Amino acid sequence: MKTIVAKEEIAPQTYRYVIRHPKLARKRQAGQFVILRMHEGGERVPLTIVDSDPEAGTVTLIFQAVGHSTQELAELGVGDKLLDLAGPLGKPTHIENYGTVCVIGGGYGTAPVLPIATVFKQAGNRMFGIIGARTRDLVILEKELGEICDDLRVATDDGSYGVKGFVTDVLAQLLAEGNKIDFVLAVGPTPMMRAVSVLTKEEGIPCMVSLNPLMIDGTGMCGGCRVEVDGQTKFACVDGPEFDGHLVNYHLLMKRQGAYKHEENMALSVGSHCKIGLDD
Ligand code: NAD
Ligand code: FES
């Protein structure tokens, strides 16, 4: 059992949990994730590890209560226990000194960007950061990313804070200002990652994205997280979650991400757990 030792609502319906798990805190690397279960028979929820403290033996997770299971998770509090927290899963981020890196986070997809930005900075890169959110209240981790990035910009869809527009508008602006960017890392909604990939491809800038397809076992066995990259089938849980954004088949990814919308809506409306089939 893994105990929640701290809980904070960092934006509406968006929570930061610090969880005691000494082994995971020692082993995890940037870009890796966990799959948690609250109780026997519960859904398996994949979440990126945002931070860890090996001395305190804790890991930090950030999630938004958007579905049935994450809403159930949000009801827990300090002292409550999770049944299990499997990980670290997935390949760590490939880090090198590219020169100038721009990290881009969309909505609560900004959370996985924080550990990656940290290691890119440690590798000696000059750092641009872009955070995008629908509105001011939903901007997260601005302070934390501001401490890492040499230049951090915020965009909101409604213009309530920062630049009015999408993260791609800010990236285009950075390039129009004559900034040379050698590498882009983007995490957020799939349409955002697709748009960032299109722009960076046009500009000849390498781009990595962290994909979030449906995941079940997280070990490469069930095939639930399969994605097409460069015409080949890959499993995001073991081959990713990060892939070359220019080679991802986003059309297929979005189609598969929408496959269980009906079941998720059912689970939300009846407050019970719907099982995902593996035979799609
Ligand atoms: P959202 O829909 O509010 O969008 C956030 C921002 O993304 C927008 O403000 C905008 O700047 C940008 N954006 C959205 N659509 C765009 C488009 N078509 N073109 C350019 N920019 C666009 O985001 P949300 O509701 O907070 O959802 C966050 C997403 O991040 C979810 O889809 C979630 O699955 C994903 N996520 C991914 C991971 C991962 O590890 N891969 C982790 C957490 C969250
Ligand atoms: Fe089952 Fe990746 S989640 S293969």
Image (cartoon, helix red, strand yellow):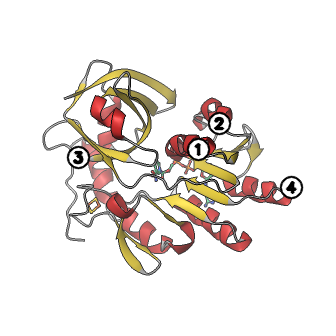
Dot 1: what SS?
A: helix
Which of the two discs, 4 and 1, sits closer to the camera?
Answer: 1
Q: Which mark is residue 43?
A: 3
Dot 4: what SS?
A: loop
Of pointers 1 and 3, the one earlier in the residue sequence: 3
Amino acid type shown at disc 2: Ile
Which of the two discs, 2 and 3, sits closer to the camera?
Answer: 2
CA–CA distance in space, label 4 to label 3 = 46 Å
Residue 132 seen in the current view:
yes
Q: Are marks 2 and 1 in contact (CB under 8 Å)?
A: yes
Amino acid type shown at disc 4: Glu
Q: Which mark is residue 117?
A: 1
Residue 134 seen in the current view:
no
Residue 229 location, quadrant: bottom left
Dot 3: what SS?
A: loop
Q: Which mark is residue 148?
A: 2
Residue at 60 percent across and 63 percent down: it is 207
